[in-house]
Image: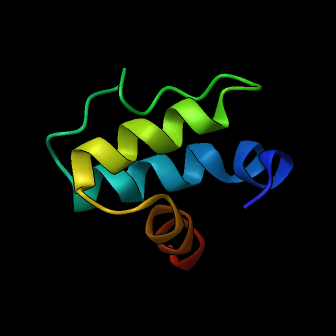
Amino acid sequence: MDSLELKGKWNELKGKVKQAYGDLTEDDLKHEEGKDDELYGKLQQKTGKTRDEVITWLKSL
């Protein structure tokens, strides 16, 4: 998932991510331009998935 694709869909995806993982906070899901890797890292830590699994999961939402 490239930066532009993530940025454009993030507000929509954020709600679905929170439904799947209720313990994620707004801070965990904060997306700042140019910090995609940081967001993926936070999601990896909270979900226990690898980076590729996180990206594949987000694409499937």
Q: How many marks?
A: 0
Residue 47 point in image, percent of width and height: 25, 55
Residue 11 point in image, percent of width and height: 58, 43
Question: 55 or 51: which is nearer to us?
Answer: 51
Where 24 falls versus 18 (above or below)? Answer: above
Residue 8 point in image, percent of width and height: 77, 48
Q: Is residue 12 left or right of residue 53?
A: right
Instruction: Name the residue at 66% across, 27% down.
Output: 35
Q: Is residue 37 left or right of residue 57?
A: right
Residue that lies at the very extreme toward the left in this rendered image:
23
Residue that lies at the very extreme toward the right in this rendered image:
4
- Quarter of the figure with residue 26: top left
Question: 31 or 55: which is nearer to us?
Answer: 55
Instruction: Tell me which colouring the rendered structure shows.
Output: rainbow
Where 36 falls versus 5 (above or below)? Answer: above
- Quarter of the figure with residue 5: bottom right
Question: 14 or 50: which is nearer to us?
Answer: 50
* Image quarter of the N terminus: bottom right
Instruction: Name the residue at 65% across, 37% down.
Output: 36
Residue 20 point in image, percent of width and height: 25, 62
Question: 6 or 37: which is nearer to us?
Answer: 37
Q: Is residue 48 left or right of residue 27?
A: left
Instruction: Name the residue at 32% across, 62% down.
Output: 49
